[in-house]
Image (cartoon, rainbow, N blue to C red):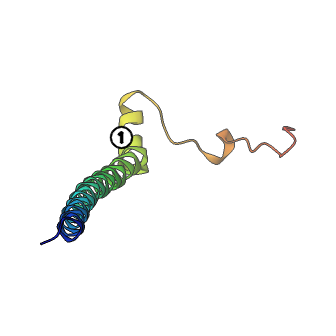
């Protein structure tokens, strides 16, 4: 083999090895990023589930069925019509 053919063969082989190394690096980086994305999606899903649960709990705590008995324990009562005052939109009585 003459030296120029041997040089071209070595250069071609070096470029091929570098290309394969780059493709391997790129694929492994894509897999890492995909794993991070899956982790973030899982965290978002858990946070949304927790939010729904907290909203449900807040709704139960604000319900009339829960407030009225506790208000009666404090000596409060449901007002009669004569005890209610409805304010106008401009604050007039």
Query: In the picture shown, does residue 18 fall above or below 12?
Result: above
Q: Position of residue 15 (x, y in %)?
A: 25, 64
Horizontal placement of 91 versus 12: left or right?
right
Nearest the eye: 4 or 62: 4
Farthest front residue in view: 2
Question: For numbered disc 1, what is the local secondary structure?
Answer: helix
User: In the image, is 15 to the left or to the right of 77?
Assistant: left
- Residue 32, picture quadrant: bottom left
Q: Nearer the viewer, residue 1 or 86?
A: 1
Q: How many residues crowd around disc 1 within 10 Å: few (fewer than 14), some, or many (20 or more)? A: few
1 over 83 or under it: above or below: below
Residue at position x 27%, y 60% from top?
26
Q: Position of residue 40 (x, y in %)?
A: 31, 52
User: What residue is pinned by disc 1?
Assistant: 69
Towards the viewer: 90 or 70: 90
Q: What is the residue that sits farthest to the top in this orientation? A: 74
How many numbered circles does the render carry?
A: 1
- Quadrant in the picture for residue 41: bottom left
Residue that lies at the very extreme toward the left in this rendered image:
1
Residue 6 place in picture, x, y as percent? 17, 67
* Residue at image location 42% in from the left, 34% down from the top: 71
Q: Nearer the viewer, residue 56 or 63?
A: 56
- Quadrant of the snapshot with the N terminus: bottom left
In the image: residue 60, left or right of residue 25: right
User: What's the residue at 21%, 61% (across, down)?
Assistant: 14
Q: Quadrant of the C terminus?
A: top right
Residue 28 spot, x, y in % from top left: 20, 58
Rendering quarter of residue 72: top left
């Amino acid at each position: 083999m003459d030296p120029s053919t041997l040089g071209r063969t070595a250069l071609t082989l070096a470029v091929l090895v570098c290309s394969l190394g780059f493709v391997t690096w790129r694929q492994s980086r894509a897999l890492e990023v995909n794993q991070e994305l899956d982790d973030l999606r899982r965290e978002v899903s858990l946070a949304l589930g927790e939010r729904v649960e907290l909203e449900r709990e807040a709704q139960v705590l604000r319900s009339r069925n829960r407030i009225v008995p506790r208000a009666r324990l404090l000596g409060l009562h449901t007002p009669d019509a004569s005890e209610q005052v409805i304010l106008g939109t401009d604050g007039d009585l």
